[in-house]
Structures are given as structure tokens and as C-alpha cells.
Image: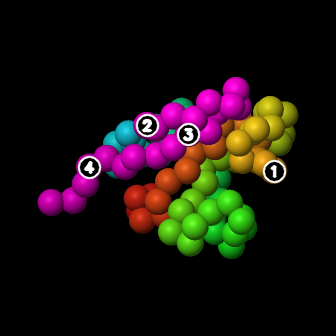
Amino acid sequence: MAETNANVTVFDTDGTTRSVEVSKDNMLTELQTLVGGYIEMVRHHQAPNALKPDEIFIVNEEGLLHKLAPNPTVRGLVGNVVLMKDADFD
């Protein structure tokens, strides 16, 4: 039986890190809530020093436009950043 939830790590702009369980049935909405807007995926080839080949970051697509705070844990990205397995995003 397939997993119905995905475990993700959220790097908040206040410097905290938390683990969150996201429902695969409602993933888009839950990821949008975690990053505060429309999502954009950052893949390994875009951040090879920060990601393993099977990982992705999910960020707020309009983070720069909305002048979100820089993320202190994941340098070069703004707003809350979600780390998850690429295979869980399907």
C-alpha cells in the first residue's frame, strides 16, 4: 500500500527547523500554506551544494517580489523553505 503522507522539513525565516507530515492527497494546498503562497520547486541541479540528487526545495514563487525575509538556514533563498524527497512530490 502506498504512503499517504510525506515527511518534510521546514526551514523557517526565524531560524527554526521543524518536521511536518504533509498529506499526499492535499499536498499542493499544504505546501502553499507552509511557504505562504504559490510554490516553486528548486531541484538538485539548481542547488547542487544544498541538495542531494533525490531532494527538492519548495519555496514561495513570488518570494522576491513580496520581499520575504532571507532564509538564514538555506542561503540564497527567501521565505520559508520546505525540504522534501523528489519522489514524494509526484
Marking on residue 76: 1
Q: Considering the numbered disc 2 on the image, is that residue within a helix, a strand or a loop?
A: strand
Give x and y (percent) for residue 79: 72, 37
Comes first in the chain, label 1 or label 3:
3
In magenta, the rendered stretch is: 1-20
Q: Earlier in the sequence, mark 1 or mark 2?
A: 2
In the displayed structure, 15 sits above or below 2; it is above
Q: Position of residue 44 (x, y in %)?
A: 64, 68
Q: Mark 3 points at which residue?
A: 10
Q: Residue at the location (72% across, 47% down)?
A: 74
Between label 2 and label 4, give the one nearer the viewer.
2
Residue 2, can we see it? yes
Q: Do the residues labelled 1 and 2 touch (CB within 8 Å)?
A: no
What kind of element bears circle 3?
strand
Q: In which quarter of the image is residue 87?
A: bottom left
Q: Mark 2 points at which residue?
A: 20
